[in-house]
């Protein structure tokens, strides 16, 4: 723990209590108090001296807390939240026996599966999710049709999604292709909501199955669905190195290739 005051949302994030965004939301909603008074976003606090509460409960802060990062093979049908008001199974249910509090880095939608990172290190989580990182995320996608050359070009150069914003260029390979079923490998370099499914929808591809296989240098490998493990020191070093390299490139951001602006086609996507 830092020896000097730090912003409230940073303290909550670094301690794995809330993500930075969720911490800011909680502060804005008046759910966080410091020494009995509602605090403001950016307010400096000293966890060694200040009494900090969240939703009326006093928070206990760990000293010299060990930073951990887990990889989880999220199965289909599990939501990427720390709790769910509908009572659906969430990723934290799969980590019920893990001794430290961690939270997901980004998310996979309910019907998607594969690699999900979780950590108690708020700063590392923010670096992974920050738009400047352009950290590649690779997916194995099964679609219910033959894939055309035109669709491949559109996905790789960028497509305009249903919100009117174009995607960054991506890397796509056809692993197998049949009249009623094709398997693709797609790597994207940004993290917008349900982006891969929306990209497929925009070019007329119906997703039957979607599995994330890697985040930057971290690969899912043979980890069974529903299981998790801590990243090895070598994996952590590779992840931090990839982030540093990407951040050093952020002064010269990726440029979009020329593309034809195309909106989503009129068809069902099979979520």
Image (cartoon, grey):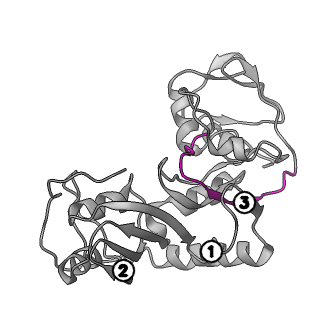
Q: Secondary structure at mark 1?
A: strand
Q: In the rendered image, is residue 200 in sight?
A: yes
Q: In the figure, residue 142 lies in which quadrant?
A: bottom left
Q: Which residues are magenta?
A: 64-81
Q: Is 34 in front, or is 168? A: 168
Q: Which residue is mark 3?
A: 70
Judge the density around disc 1: few (<14), some (14-19), many (≥20) Cα neighbours within 10 Å: some
Say whether disc 2 or disc 3 marks the residue closer to the N-terminus. Answer: 3
| Dot 3 crowding, Cα within 10 Å, few <14, some 14–19, many 20+ | some
Relative to 211, 225 lies left or right: right
Secondary structure beneath label 2: strand
Q: Quick check: 89 above or below 177? A: above
Look at mark 2 in the image and give the residue it sits on. Answer: 172
User: Which residue is tagged 1?
Assistant: 219
Q: Residue at x 48, y 73 (%)?
A: 136
- Residue contact between numbered discs 1 and 2, judged by CB atoms under 8 Å: no
Q: Nearer the viewer, mark 2 or mark 3?
A: 2
């Amino acid at each position: 723990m830092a020896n000097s005051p730090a912003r409230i949302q940073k303290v909550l994030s670094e301690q794995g209590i809330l993500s930075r965004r969720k911490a800011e939301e909680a502060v804005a909603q008046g759910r966080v108090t410091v020494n009995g008074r509602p605090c403001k976003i950016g307010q400096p606090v000293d966890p060694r001296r200040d009494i900090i509460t969240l939703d009326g409960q006093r928070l206990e802060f760990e000293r010299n807390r060990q930073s951990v990062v887990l990889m989880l093979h999220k199965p289909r049908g599990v939501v990427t939240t720390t709790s769910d008001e509908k009572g659906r199974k969430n990723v934290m249910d799969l980590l019920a026996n893990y001794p430290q509090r961690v939270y997901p880095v980004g998310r996979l939608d309910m019907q998607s599966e594969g690699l999900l990172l979780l950590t108690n290190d708020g700063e590392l989580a923010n670096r992974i999710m920050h738009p400047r990182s352009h950290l590649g995320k690779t997916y194995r996608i099964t679609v219910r049709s033959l894939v055309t050359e035109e669709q491949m070009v559109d996905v790789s150069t960028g497509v305009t999604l249903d919100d009117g914003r174009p995607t960054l260029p991506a890397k796509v390979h056809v692993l197998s292709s049949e009249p009623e079923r094709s398997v693709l490998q797609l790597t994207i370099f940004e993290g917008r909501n349900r982006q891969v499914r929306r990209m497929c929808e925009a070019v007329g591809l119906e997703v039957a199955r979607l599995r994330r296989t890697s985040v930057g240098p971290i690969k899912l490998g043979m980890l069974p669905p529903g299981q998790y493990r801590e990243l090895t020191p070598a994996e952590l070093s590779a992840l931090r190195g990839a982030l540093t390299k990407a951040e050093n490139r952020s002064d010269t951001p990726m440029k979009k290739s020329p593309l034809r602006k195309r909106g989503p086609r009129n068809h069902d996507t099979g979520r």
